[in-house]
Structure formats: C-alpha cells, structure tokens
Image (cartoon, rainbow, N blue to C red):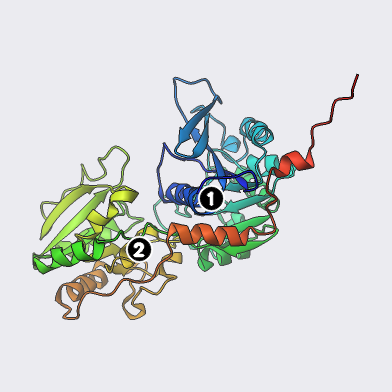
Amino acid sequence: MGGSLNMPHILVGNVFFAPYTYGGATIVAEEVARALHRDHGWQVSALSAVSRADLPPYALRKLQTGAIASYLINLPPERAYAEMYSNPVVTEIAARLIQSLCPDLVHLHCLQELGAGPIRAAREAGVPVVVSTHDFWWLCERQFMIDPEGRYCAQTPVRVENCRGCVLDHGRAQTRSRHLAAALEQADLVTYPSEFARNLSRSSGLRGKRDAVWQNGVTLPCPGFSEAQAERRRKGGPHVFAFCGGPSQLKGWPLIRDAFLTLERGDFRVLLVDGAPGGGWWDKVQLSRLPGQWEVVPRYEQDAMDAFWARVDTLLFPSQWKETFGLTVREALCRGVRVIQTDSGGTVEHQGPDRDRMLTIGGGAAELQAELRHALDRPDPHPAPVPVAGFADQAAEFVRLTQGLIEPQGAWSRKHPIPKRKSA
C-alpha cells in the first residue's frame, strides 16, 4: 500500500538506520517503519548518523532505502562528552529537517551519539514526539548499566549519586542525568519494550507526558520453515545448541565455556554466531579443548534467519544482566526452539520460559551444566512454537498508541502557515 495525501508522515530517528544497519534496536526501528508504510500507507523518513572521513563534519546526506528517504548526519569522531547526549549542531540540523519535511510525528529510538536535542526541535515546531527506549542510555552513561569490571549494576532504582565508583567524572554524569530526564519529560509518549524496563525507568525518575509498554516484534518464520526444521530433525544427528551473544562475560560466554569444559560427553554440536559487522568475534577464542563439535557461523540477516534456526534445537541465553527485551529469545521460541536462559529482566516476559528451570544471574557453571544435560537427555518431544508478535503486529500497535497525537497532512505546516503574499 502506498502513501497518500491524507496519510501521516513520520520522521524516525535512530543512531543507525538502513543502509547502515547495526544492532537489534536498529532492526526494530527499520522493520516497524517499513510495516507502517507497507501495511498502513504512512510516509516514512529517517534521520540517523554516520562518521566518515570523506564527508565534511555535520554534512547531511540523503539516501533512498526502498520507500524510505534516509537522512544521515556525518558526526565528527572527536566530540565532547556533553555532545554525546546534547549536541546543538545536531539539534539545529534536526530542526531544519523537520521544518523542511513537515512531518506529522517524530518517532525517536536510540539517541546515543545524536543526543536528545531532536525532542526539543520537534516540540518547538509543534510536532508530537514519541521516544521509544531500547536500553538504559537514559539512566546510565555506560548505556547498559554495566560497571567497568563487566558486572551488572543492579541498582533499583537507579540513583546517579551512587555512580561515583563507575563514572570518570561524577559531576558531569549528574549534569547528564538531569538534562536527559528534563528532555524526556517533553515527549508526548515514551514507550518501553517490557514492564521491567518501564518499572525501573519510572522508579528512577524518568517520565514522559504518557508512557506505555510497546513490546518489540520479531521476524516470524516463513511458510515452509516447520517442514525444513522437521526434515532436519528426522535425519537425526547430534543435538544442536546455539549461542548468539559473543565472547563476553556480559552475555555469559565464560559460563558456557566452563559448563561445557567439564561435560564428559560429546554428542552435540554448538553454533557460535559471529555478530561483529566484519566478523572476528571468535578469532582469539580457543575452542579446541571443548567437547563436541563447535562451529562459528556468520550472523544471519532478517530475511535469511530461518536457515539458521532450522539447524538449532536449543538456544543458550545465560545473560548476566537484566536486559530490556531479548529479541533472540523470541526468534527462537516462535520457531519451536527451546531456550536455556537466566531470569534476565524483559527477556522472560512471554509464554516461553520454564520458570522452574530458570538460571540465576551469577550462578555457577554447574547450574548451567545441569540444564545442558537435561536438554541432551530429555525424552519429551520438541516444543510447539510460542506465539510471538511480529513486526507487523508491532506497527499496528504503534498506530493504536499514537491515535490522538497525529494530525495528517502536515502538522507543522498547519501550526506554522506560510503567510500569503499581499497583492500588489
């Protein structure tokens, strides 16, 4: 369905956007934007960032990615601390772009690098603003509430006065916290991907004019996936585990390594997804001492993930921090793939987890090893797919949530009409 003159025009803002896609939040921003255009006829433009030496600092470059006009700000690599969350040049560029495009709604996702200035730019233009949080950037200058030693902060609620041992300059961290809280108050709607994320943010003092839980969608399996999966399983072979989190303590890799290291059997395969943009996550990781068969596979694209998941029996997700959502968990569950996971915030807000077998954050390798043995020896059949929202469902929910905010045919131009010329 194409756009029409009486359909809304939305300007989407995210630190990355196609054709420069990186990270789960970017996938959500892109897929929802495409669904709004495809299924609801909305006109979509996008604002994002690049950092290229061959372009002048703060140059605005326009690219066309399908039906979406994408505007990219070239951020210089050397910027001050405050410019990472409040950049007056970016704010001015956003203001000019809003004035030029006359959108009916500005929808902002991850604003690290860009800063919170686009909220002010939209408000001053009289355009309603939705801010969708995906991580803890609004609460934590380290973005994920992970301390310098790689441990989860675990503050509930978050109080910046308790961050002295974690940040380099506590005074500037306090200034950042006050500025971002005040900026978010100007948003007409703030959305969170889980109840966990909303509750922590609310208790920590973050407020918009209105807020809501807006769960992310996932790319759902294509027709024929279940047949391909069943065919692979009929052929037999070892049980296949998968891990998509990379070789970091945060995602639980040391726990996985230690649990497998003393597992006195080898009747399984493990697929390690290399999520680095150019590959290389696992180049320096020694896998030869681990039992079983280990294989590093390239990260999958959204339109090709079925081929990966058809190979997998159990996803390993022993995250060692409280996450806001858990996209990979839902991708697995909606395809009938079991998940071994920790009780990690928003990752468990669905029908899939076995509450009695949930791993504890900080639990030892023996706890995970017991679950590995259970997965290898359990006699019950593979589970049925768990109902999970797709991106089309998420876009439809966004349309519902923004009813009352949007005035089609150019909110900015109606609020700021161009004066008619007087006749001579």
Q: Nearer the viewer, residue 136 or 80?
A: 136
Circle 1 Cα neighbour tier, 10 Å, few/some/many (<14 / 14–19 / ≥20): some
Image check: 234 left or right of 169?
Answer: left
Task: Look at the image and tell me whether residue 324 can be seen.
Answer: no
Q: Measured from the top left, where is residue 166 in percent x and y?
A: 50, 50
- Residue at mark 1 to residue at mark 2: CA–CA distance: 22 Å
Residue under the image location 45 percent in, 25 percent down: 52
Residue 229 appears anywhere in the view: yes
Q: Amino acid at mark 2?
A: Val
Q: Quadrant of residue 161?
A: bottom right
In the image, residue 90 lies at what x, y percent?
Answer: 61, 33
Nearest-to-viewer mark from 1 and 2: 2
Question: Mark 1 highlights which residue?
Answer: 137
Residue neighbourhood size for the residue with mark 2, other residues' Cα within 10 Å, grouped as few (<14), some (14–19), many (≥20): many
Report which residue position mark 2 lands on: 329
Q: Position of residue 392 (x, y in %)?
A: 46, 58
Q: Are marks 1 and 2 in contact (CB under 8 Å)?
A: no
